[in-house]
Image (cartoon, rainbow, N blue to C red):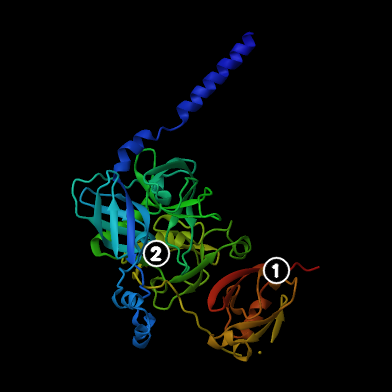
């Protein structure tokens, strides 16, 4: 009996402790929801009543009177197209944050508040790269919320969202931070937002709405979901407040965004590359190419350098680099740490400017002459290769064939790749390749720099041990 009572008391106490540990979102919702708004974006759809779609005059004369009048005098209003999203007020004088994709292409934008007041909104500016937009309404003494510190967020921390999913205004959902620094490249392959991943239920209509921490500060702007059904499956992504603050300040000041720019093409460092570059573990952003006249070239950065730190921020994977550099103001001089030929080297770099409409791209080119078989690949001088890809290249050795199950094949080298560096030797012609191969030993891991369909990249290749 005593045992049964003790067990019941233990369950009661455990239940009480568990209940006490769960957060109460009610006060945050009550205090912050008046600053959350619904965004109604409208655009004039094309009207399918152009003159070439109307009956000809002769045809009209053959129609009955009622139908002739219908065609002669019918002038229907242009249909409206658009969508809805969410947003939040960040100042009492009417500045509002939402997503770029919510208002993109809209002719009119209406902001509806929780008390059912509506305002016509001016689009101050938008930024497609970060998917953010700044609106303003003509009103004062509005309720507003503050941006918090997304840098202090921890994985596993509670967060909640308020928005209008599927038009259901001011719905509240909660969950935890699932991960930080997620990279979701855009259609143009750009990657300037280290997204916060959460399991908060986010659905169409939540876009542009706030993600709150338990202090009631906005730590992110809900932007994307991963779904196979069109609804939430627990994979939602928010733009961190740190990025939001930077973008909004620029949009407010000049209506557009300018980002920091280095002018390098980069790739991740895998285990094979880490071994070949004498790194203790895979880390950093490997420079595959340095743009001519770029800030990186002026600072002395080189192809083959591995960037491991910028302005005190650690670069663990290549996606971290644009996240850090993009938030730096052009003209800022920062310390950059690279691993070059196995040694750490510090450089001072003046950050350049990637203009609002400029595409972050480095154009590649290369071209020249022979035949060499090594590590399972057959190479020719670029000038003698039949493949069209070599015609746009200056120098290098073109891979014309790769044997199945060879070291080259296992490393991922494929026909039409152009080798421009082997180990620490630049490859301009086959003679260079032969000399570079003569320097390697059995069992070595060697980094190879390639150009593949105009894009530079590094691949690590393992030289087999002698039998």
- Where's residue 35, x and y in %? 29, 45
Q: Is residue 91 left or right of residue 214?
A: left
Q: Quadrant of the N terminus?
A: top right
Q: Which residue is mark 2?
A: 129
Which-is-in-front pick, marks 1 and 2? 2
Question: Which quadrant of the structure image shows residue 382?
Answer: bottom right
Per the model, the C-alpha gap separating discs 1 and 2 is 36 Å
> Closest to the observer: 437 or 115?
115
Q: Earlier in the sequence, mark 1 or mark 2?
A: 2
Question: Which quadrant of the structure image shows residue 108?
Answer: bottom left
Q: Quadrant of the C terminus?
A: bottom right
**Dot 2: what SS?**
loop
- Where's residue 408, x and y in %? 69, 73
The relative height of residue 150 versus residue 120 in the rendered view (above or below) is above
Q: Residue at x 24, y 54 (%)?
A: 119
Q: Is residue 207 left or right of residue 254?
A: right
The relative height of residue 166 versus residue 8 in the rendered view (above or below) is below
Label 1 neighbour load within 10 Å: few <14, some 14-19, many 20+ = some
* Residue 199 visible in rendering: yes
Q: Which residue is mark 1?
A: 410
Which residue occupies the extreme front position in the image? 64
- Where's residue 304, x and y in %? 53, 70
């Amino acid at each position: 009996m005593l045992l049964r009572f003790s067990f019941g008391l233990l369950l009661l106490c455990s239940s009480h402790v568990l209940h006490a540990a769960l957060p109460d979102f009610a006060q945050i919702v009550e205090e912050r929801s008046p600053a959350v708004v619904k965004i109604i974006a409208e655009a004039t759809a094309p009207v399918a009543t152009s003159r070439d779609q109307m009956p000809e005059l002769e045809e009209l004369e053959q129609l009955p009177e009622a139908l002739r009048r219908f065609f002669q005098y019918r002038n229907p209003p242009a249909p409206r197209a658009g969508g809805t999203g969410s947003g939040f007020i960040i100042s009492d004088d009417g500045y509002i944050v939402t997503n770029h994709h919510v208002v993109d292409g809209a002719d009119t934008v209406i902001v509806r508040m929780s008390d059912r007041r509506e305002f016509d909104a001016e689009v101050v500016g938008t930024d497609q790269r970060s998917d953010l937009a700044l609106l303003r309404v003509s009103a004062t003494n509005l309720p507003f919320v503050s941006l918090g510190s997304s840098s202090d967020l921890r994985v596993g921390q509670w967060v909640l969202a308020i928005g209008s999913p599927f038009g259901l205004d001011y719905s509240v959902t909660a969950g935890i931070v699932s991960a930080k620094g997620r990279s979701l490249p855009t259609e143009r392959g750009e990657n300037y937002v280290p997204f916060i991943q959460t399991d908060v239920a986010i659905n169409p209509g939540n876009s542009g709405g706030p993600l709150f921490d338990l202090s009631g500060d906005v730590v992110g702007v809900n932007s994307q979901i991963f779904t196979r059904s069109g609804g939430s499956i627990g994979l939602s992504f928010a733009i961190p407040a740190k990025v939001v603050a930077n973008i909004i300040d620029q949009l407010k000041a000049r209506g557009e965004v300018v980002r920091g720019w280095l002018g390098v093409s980069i790739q991740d460092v895998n285990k094979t590359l880490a071994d070949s570059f004498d790194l203790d573990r895979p880390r950093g952003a490997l420079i595959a190419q340095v743009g001519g006249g770029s800030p990186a070239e002026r600072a002395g950065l080189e192809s083959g350098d591995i960037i491991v730190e910028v302005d005190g921020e650690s670069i663990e994977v290549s996606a971290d680099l644009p996240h850090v550099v993009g938030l730096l103001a052009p003209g800022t001089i920062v310390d950059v740490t690279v691993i070059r030929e196995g040694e750490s080297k510090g450089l001072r770099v003046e950050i350049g400017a990637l203009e609002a409409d400029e595409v972050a791209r480095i154009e590649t080119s290369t071209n020249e002459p022979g035949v060499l078989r090594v590590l399972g690949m057959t190479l020719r001088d670029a000038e003698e290769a039949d493949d069209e890809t070599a015609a746009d290249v200056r120098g290098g050795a073109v891979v014309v064939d790769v044997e199945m199950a060879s070291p080259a094949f296992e490393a991922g080298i494929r026909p039409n790749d152009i080798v421009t560096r082997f180990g620490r030797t630049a490859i301009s012609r086959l003679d260079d390749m032969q000399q570079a191969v003569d320097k390697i030993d059995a069992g070595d891991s060697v980094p190879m720099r390639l150009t593949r369909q105009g894009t530079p990249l590094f691949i690590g290749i393992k030289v087999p041990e002698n039998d």
